[in-house]
């Protein structure tokens, strides 16, 4: 439609020019008839010739002499003169628009070259009303045609867009919904079919996404099954080992020197196996229970850990506790105990492995919004393997008999409090972890 509007002005100007040229041509033919009879024609014939050409009168210019050949009364004054010999396209367009806009009937003079270059100029006087009517008819025809073309084009475009874009996109969307219903069903993964490059790319991206996701879901399912199997085995194994532990304890006191020598190693191995089973079970519990917050003093809790882990009695290991007296925390005491026990036990194990003297340092404090507890040691620092898999279950252990669960569990427990367990530093000079516990307002003490 827009294209039609843009070409409308030049084409209506062209139409008007053709119309005027046709008038000139007809007027010339009429004047030839007159010249052929040497001017001897009746008034009726003259009127008929003029009416046929649709002009008021015809003037021929020959050798600079203006000759009125045919004439009839002109209704009004001549309002304009158009010389088609010198009219530029711009003039033609402007004049055409003027005719369209002005609904009044005027008489105008038109000058042009006669056909065949017959050696003279021809000039006619003519009314504008028939010209305007013809131009309006023409304009209407152009409009109808463009409307028709527009409708046809729009319909073609509509069907093309629908077929090439809308339907393929709808298919992709339907596939997504179908897939979402059962993502572990590999048959529901989309197979790219579209011929449109962009849609096809979307389909392929979706296909690879769905393939990956289906694979991941299946693996997750297998891991979950494996996990529950491991939990069952750990549980039964722990019970069996506990029984074995009882017997091993007894033979430790045997009088047989060989047995007495071997028994402590046997007891140590069984104890490690039991603790492995226990930590696996602890991790296997799908979720740690949410913390039961209560107020308690941190200092005594740390002393309890030191006592239970016998940290003070280890040769070469000294404990340095720097906790403000009366520092009260609000947390789950049992869980925090486990976190601290894990961190301090790790520190102690790291120190013992070096065989040198070392210090375990525990300090704590508070800010406006949080409590912090630092557990550091002067050990050898985290081995690379532990650092790469920090806080990832079963992955980070670099210790004989270790499960790689201690740090993962501690991390989970601190996170359960809305807090963070972070590695502050780890190098040859030692390792330091920090626990941040937010002072969480708005949570009621569960234990009270
Ligand atoms: N304070 C520490 N100094 C040196 N190494 C440490 C320290 N804490 C942890 N590690 C290393 O990180 C590993 C993972 O620790 P953890 O998650 O408690 O598992 P586990 O103690 O069962 O091996 C340990 O095996 C140990 O090598
Ligand atoms: Mg540990």
Image: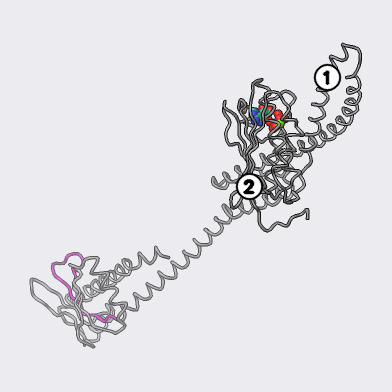
What residue is at 58 percent from the left and 54 percent from the top?
163
Look at the image and tell me whether residue 48 can be seen.
yes
Find residue 239 and report its horizontal and vertical position in percent: 89, 31
Picture layout, residue 152 above or below residue 57: above
User: Ligand 1: does it lie within 8 Å of the C-beta at label 1?
Assistant: no
Left or right of 351, for residue 304: right
Find residue 277 and report its horizontal and vertical position in percent: 81, 31
Question: Judging from the image, what secondary structure is the residue with disc 2 in?
Answer: strand
Task: Using the rendered view, name the quadrant where residue 117 is placed.
Answer: bottom left
Residue 371 circle label: 2
Let me know if residue 296 is in the magenta part: no
Q: What stretch of residues is rendered in magenta?
A: 112-128
Find residue 418 and report its horizontal and vertical position in percent: 66, 49
Crowdedness of circle 2 by 10 Å Cα count: few (<14), some, many (20+)? some
Residue 264 circle label: 1
Look at the image and tell me whether residue 396 can be seen.
no
Task: Using the rendered view, name the quadrant where residue 266 is placed.
Answer: top right
CA–CA distance between discs 1 and 2?
Answer: 42 Å
Left or right of 58, for residue 99: right
- N-terminal label among 1 and 2: 1
Task: Using the rendered view, name the quadrant where residue 232 is placed.
Answer: top right
Find residue 30 and report its horizontal and vertical position in percent: 23, 76
């Amino acid at each position: 439609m827009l294209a039609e509007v843009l070409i409308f002005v030049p084409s209506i100007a062209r139409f008007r020019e053709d119309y005027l040229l046709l008038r000139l041509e007809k007027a010339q033919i009429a004047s030839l008839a007159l010249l052929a009879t040497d001017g001897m024609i009746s008034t009726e014939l003259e009127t008929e010739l003029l009416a046929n050409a649709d002009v008021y009168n015809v003037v021929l210019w020959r050798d600079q002499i203006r000759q009125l050949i045919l004439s009839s009364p002109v209704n009004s004054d001549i309002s304009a003169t158009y010389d088609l010999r010198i009219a530029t396209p711009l003039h033609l367009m402007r004049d055409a628009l003027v005719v369209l806009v002005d609904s009044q009937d005027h008489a105008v003079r038109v000058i042009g070259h006669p056909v065949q270059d017959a050696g003279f100029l021809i000039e006619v006087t003519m009314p504008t009303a028939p010209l305007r009517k013809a131009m309006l008819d023409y304009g209407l025809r152009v409009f109808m045609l463009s409307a028709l073309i527009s409708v046809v084009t729009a319909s073609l475009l509509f069907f093309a867009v629908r077929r090439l874009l809308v339907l393929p996109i709808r298919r992709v969307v339907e596939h997504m919904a179908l897939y979402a219903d059962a993502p572990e069903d590999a048959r529901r993964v989309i197979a790219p079919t579209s011929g449109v490059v962009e849609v096809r790319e979307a389909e392929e991206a979706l296909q690879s996404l769905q393939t990956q996701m289906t694979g991941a879901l299946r693996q997750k399912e297998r891991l979950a099954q494996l996990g529950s199997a491991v939990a069952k085995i750990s549980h039964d194994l722990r019970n069996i080992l506990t029984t074995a532990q009882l017997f091993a304890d007894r033979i430790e006191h045997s009088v047989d020197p060989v047995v007495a020598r071997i028994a402590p190693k046997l007891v140590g191995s069984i104890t490690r196996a039991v603790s492995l089973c226990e930590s696996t079970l602890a991790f296997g519990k799908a979720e740690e229970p949410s913390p039961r917050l209560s107020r308690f003093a941190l200092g005594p809790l740390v002393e309890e850990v030191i006592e239970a882990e016998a940290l003070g009695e280890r040769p070469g290991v000294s404990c340095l506790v720097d906790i403000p007296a009366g520092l009260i925390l609000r947390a789950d005491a049992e869980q925090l105990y486990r976190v601290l026990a894990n961190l301090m036990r790790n520190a102690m194990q790291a120190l013992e492995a070096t065989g040198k003297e070392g210090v375990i340092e525990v300090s704590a404090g508070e800010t406006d919004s949080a409590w912090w507890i630092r557990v550091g040691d002067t050990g050898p620092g985290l081995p690379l393997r532990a650092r790469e898999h920090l806080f990832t279950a079963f992955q980070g252990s670099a210790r004989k008999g270790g499960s790689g669960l201690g740090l993962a569990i501690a991390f989970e427990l601190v996170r359960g409090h809305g807090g963070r367990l972070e590695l502050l530093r780890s190098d040859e000079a030692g390792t330091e972890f920090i626990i941040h516990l937010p002072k969480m307002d708005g949570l009621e003490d569960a234990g009270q």
